[in-house]
Image: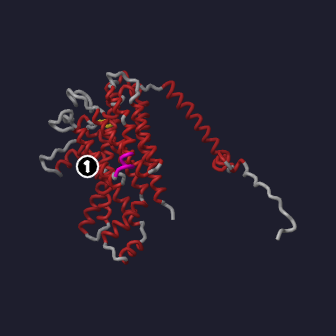
């Protein structure tokens, strides 16, 4: 039955401009109160002054010749000098390793389907291709080097297709292939006696950013499982196991990494047979891994202690044995809860790799410093620019790890009920 009075239908009015779009966001986040308005103007003034003087110095006054002169040596150090590779060209070896990394990133992109993986894979490929077009002469950067750098883009596409259209498109396979790629990288860089084109290159010539990345990847890959084992050992009911883990953790956490690196020159060879080949790279990798494992163990233990006891009680009530309760119930939740602490430890480990200079290894920072010190008259004025460039490089890697960590936390729902 129709009512006696019809209400005219009118279109709803749009919300005010201060509540929608960019203007709405600016108003809600920057000018929603008087003190936020004052802070916005203060920080805007600071930003304008920083950009004015900072960009003015970078464009008009700075001297970037030291970066242009070092070029690719900042990445591989002395690896390709004549003394390291007499009569051969070794520059292709780290480039082939980079192709393997690009292919793995392409596989990770296809498996995850996430925009972060896509951006990282394409970003690494684009940056590598951009290096191929640096304005160097063919004598300094040959055509073969440029082609290998350009090949990173199709390598990403090949990795994506490999994971998308073959049975290798799973997390298990990408982990297996990642381990194999790391071992192949070590073989390529070290060389094999008697194999043409793979003559051995002593680790004393390894350096640059390549050295930092190798030590960081090794430390990250090994410190996590060792830290988990130490955390479980410290919570063990076996007095001897618990005591050994506590002593290990407290000793490595109580001694500076620089001291441990110095001690590695003597202590690490004592832990292996006399005929076991131990070099500076091996000793640095062992010490950095063990040092990081001690901190990782406390992070994991904190995650285990944060779990409610009802989790383990429910697992026991279902008849699960102790090892299944730990590995299937407690440990996944503990690692999920301490992802920020774990990634923070990985970032700290990556930055700590610059300390290997004290045992005579030329990482990217020490390589540039030694070059400037050896050419003081010509490049001393470029020291601030070099340090700024190295800081930017480390920031990019550390921010990438932090960004990936945040996306993983969002995917796993960390901090959400």
Q: Is residue 273 left or right of residue 71?
A: left
Q: Position of residue 104 (x, y in %)?
A: 35, 45
Q: In this view, does 377 lie to the left or right of 186?
A: right
Instruction: Establish if 243 lies above or below 211.
Output: below
User: Which residue: 34% across, 37% down?
Assistant: 209
Residue 203: x, y in percent?
23, 38
Can residue 165 be found in the magenta stretch?
yes
Q: In this view, does 126 lie above or below 13?
A: above
Quadrant location of residue 11? bottom right
Of all residues, the one furthest to the bottom in this rendering is 317
- The front one of 41 and 127 is 127
Check disc 1 and report the residue beneath it: 286
| SS at badge 1 | helix
Q: In this view, does 159 lie above or below 334?
A: above
Chain part drawn in magenta: 161-166
Q: Nearer the viewer, residue 143 or 390?
A: 143
Give the total number of marks visible in the rendering. 1
Query: Where is residue 41 drawn, in percent x and y?
Result: 64, 41
Q: Is residue 381 in view from this perspective?
A: no
């Amino acid at each position: 039955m129709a009512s006696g009075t019809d209400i005219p239908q009118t279109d709803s009015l749009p919300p005010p401009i201060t509540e929608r779009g960019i203007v709405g966001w600016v108003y809600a986040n920057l000018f929603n109160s008087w003190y936020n308005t004052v802070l916005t103007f203060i920080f805007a003034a600071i930003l304008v002054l920083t950009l004015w003087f900072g960009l003015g110095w970078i464009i008009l006054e700075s001297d970037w010749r030291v970066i242009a002169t070092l070029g690719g040596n900042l990445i591989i150090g002395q690896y390709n000098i004549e003394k390291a590779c007499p009569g051969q060209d070794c520059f292709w070896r780290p480039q082939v390793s980079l192709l393997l990394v690009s292919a793995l990133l392409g596989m990770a992109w296809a498996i995850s389907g996430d925009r972060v993986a896509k951006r990282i894979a394409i970003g690494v490929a684009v940056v590598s291709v951009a290096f191929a077009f640096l304005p160097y002469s063919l004598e300094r950067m040959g055509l073969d080097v440029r082609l290998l750098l350009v090949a990173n883009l199709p390598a990403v596409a090949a990795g994506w297709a490999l994971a998308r259209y073959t049975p290798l498109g799973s997390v298990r396979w990408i982990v297996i292939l990642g381990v194999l790629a790391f071992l192949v990288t070590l073989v390529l860089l070290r060389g094999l006696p008697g194999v043409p084109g793979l003559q051995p290159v002593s680790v004393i010539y390894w350096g640059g950013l390549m050295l930092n990345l190798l030590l960081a990847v090794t430390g990250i890959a090994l410190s996590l499982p060792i830290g988990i084992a130490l955390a479980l050992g410290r919570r063990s009911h076996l007095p001897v196991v618990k005591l050994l883990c506590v002593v290990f953790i407290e000793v490595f956490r109580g001694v500076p990494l620089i001291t441990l690196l110095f001690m590695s020159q003597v202590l690490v060879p004592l832990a292996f047979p006399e005929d076991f080949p131990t070099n500076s790279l091996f000793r640095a990798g062992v010490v950095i891994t063990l040092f990081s494992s001690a901190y990782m163990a406390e992070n994991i233990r904190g995650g285990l202690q944060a779990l409610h006891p009802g989790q383990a009680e429910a697992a026991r009530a279902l008849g699960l044995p102790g090892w299944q309760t730990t590995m299937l119930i407690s440990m996944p939740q503990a690692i999920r809860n301490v992802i920020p602490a774990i990634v923070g430890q990985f970032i700290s480990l990556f930055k700590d790799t610059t300390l290997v200079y004290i045992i005579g290894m030329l990482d990217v920072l020490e390589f540039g410093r030694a070059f400037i010190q050896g050419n003081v008259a010509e490049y001393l004025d470029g020291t601030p620019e070099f340090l700024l460039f190295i800081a930017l490089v480390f920031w990019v890697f550390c921010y990438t790890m932090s960004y990936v960590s945040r996306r993983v936390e969002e995917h796993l729902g960390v901090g959400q009920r």
